[in-house]
Image (tube, rainbow, N blue to C red):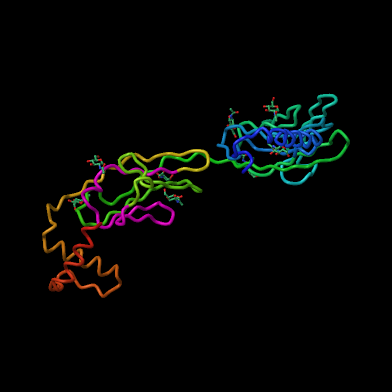
Amino acid sequence: MELSSAPLHKGQLPWRGLLLAASLLIYWSSPTKAQVSVEAVPPHVAEGANVLLLVHNLTETVHVFYWYKGENRDSSNEIARFITSTSEITTGPAYSGRESIYPNGSLLFQNVTQNDTGAYTLHMIMENFDLKTLSVQFHVHQPVTKPSIEVSNTTVKEMDTVSLTCSSNDTGISIHWLFNGSSMALLGLTDRMKLSLDNSTLSINPVRREDAGEYQCEVSNAVSSERSDPIQLDIIDLGPSDNSPNKVDEVAYTVLSINGQTPKPPTSALPSPRSTETVYSEVKKQ
Ligand SMILES: *[C@@H]1O[C@H](CO)[C@@H](O)[C@H](O)[C@H]1NC(C)=O
Ligand SMILES: *[C@@H]1O[C@H](CO)[C@@H](O)[C@H](O)[C@H]1NC(C)=O
Ligand SMILES: *[C@@H]1O[C@H](CO)[C@@H](O)[C@H](O)[C@H]1NC(C)=O
Ligand SMILES: *[C@@H]1O[C@H](CO)[C@@H](O)[C@H](O)[C@H]1NC(C)=O
Ligand SMILES: *[C@@H]1O[C@H](CO)[C@@H](O)[C@H](O)[C@H]1NC(C)=O
Ligand SMILES: *[C@@H]1O[C@H](CO)[C@@H](O)[C@H](O)[C@H]1NC(C)=O
Ligand SMILES: *[C@@H]1O[C@H](CO)[C@@H](O)[C@H](O)[C@H]1NC(C)=O
Ligand SMILES: *[C@@H]1O[C@H](CO)[C@@H](O)[C@H](O)[C@H]1NC(C)=O
């Protein structure tokens, strides 16, 4: 770090040259150290799409490539083999008609189904007759369907509670909410808003004028996402009620119950002017 960031003086050039030569020597003297690996591209694939099981870093000739379904080399699970010397392809009992084996050992799956999810094993007879076995996995997902929003009433009085529920028949999804077309995660939820653990229900308590607008939910999995139709939430304005004694009462009730103190019924006598003032300023801050 220090060397490369320091200004270069003439005397440092041979030193850097040596370092470079040394690293090139290490590289050239060990070409077989390159680690052969297999990769599923993509690892998460939509039903009906294709996936390629790629063999990387193959630096030597391979006599035979064998592909098996599952993690074991079991002849009843053989999909296909490729014999390099004759370019001969032989299919096995696990061949479904949708797989193609290539001369470089890679295996292409077309039109995948849920049943194709899982592990696959590549077995190779190397140039020097060493054996190499590698496994890889991919996951097939059904594209999600369009969700819908359930709400008891899209017209809500200010200070009431409203709950929006994102309804979807899909499993293994994550749910996100949008307000007026923007992600609510980015906008930031106010402290009056709560999401259920799985994000499927958005509750607003108490609802305010500024919550009026279009709500949508979006469900997604590893391969797709869909948004619900927007629902319009209308808020019935209670008027400029900041001075209304009724409102202060309701607010005092809410704040007191959050603090875990015995809530006073809203209809009871007003609290002392001192505590009303405290609660009132607390609410104005939000
Ligand atoms: C190929 O091998 C090299 C050297 O072991 C390694 O650094 C590199 O990550 C490998 N590439 C892949 C795609 O496996
Ligand atoms: C192997 O061959 C297939 C088909 O020609 C090609 O798509 C793939 O990129 C090749 N794999 C590598 C690692 O070069
Ligand atoms: C893909 O597979 C399904 C059954 O799994 C079949 O109905 C469909 O015709 C296939 N599509 C293609 C393009 O082969
Ligand atoms: C998936 O596998 C099950 C049981 O192995 C089989 O009954 C079903 O027909 C298969 N589905 C497809 C689309 O191949
Ligand atoms: C929805 O709420 C508003 C305001 O409280 C009310 O006027 C309306 O009748 C309600 N609609 C339904 C379908 O319950
Ligand atoms: C879920 O499935 C049921 C029954 O097939 C259907 O009535 C409902 O509309 C579906 N819901 C969604 C959100 O797709
Ligand atoms: C819930 O939403 C948040 C913010 O959008 C997100 O980070 C999180 O992954 C979601 N959780 C689930 C279970 O969908
Ligand atoms: C959201 O959209 C509604 C119109 O649907 C608009 O009246 C409201 O001001 C918007 N709210 C925000 C915070 O952008």
Displayed quadrant of residue 247: bottom left
Quarter of the image with the N terminus is: top right
Q: Residue at x 29, y 42 (%)?
A: 214
21 displayed left or right of 271: right
User: Residue at 65% of width from left, 37% of height from top?
Assistant: 40
**Where is residue 273 shown, x and y percent of the image?**
13, 71
Q: Is residue 1 visible?
A: no
Q: Is residue 241 left or right of residue 147?
A: left
Q: Is residue 104 magenta?
A: no
Residue 208 lies within the magenta run: yes
Q: Which residues are magenta?
A: 190-219
**Residue 129 at x, y = what percent?**
88, 37
**Front position in the image: 246 or 144:** 246
Q: Position of residue 227 (x, y in %)?
A: 39, 39
Q: Taking 246 as reference, is 202 above or below it? A: above
Of residues 7 and 49, the one nearer the viewer is 7
- Image quarter for residue 65? top right
Work out which quarter of the rendered image holds the C terminus and state it.
Answer: bottom left
Q: Nearer the viewer, residue 277 or 250?
A: 277
Q: Could you tell me if residue 86 is visible in this image? A: yes
* Residue 7 sits in quarter: top right
Q: Position of residue 116 (x, y in %)?
A: 64, 40
Instruction: Tell which residue pokes out farthest to the bottom in this image.
Output: 262
Q: Which residue is pictured at 52% across the width and 39% down the height?
A: 223
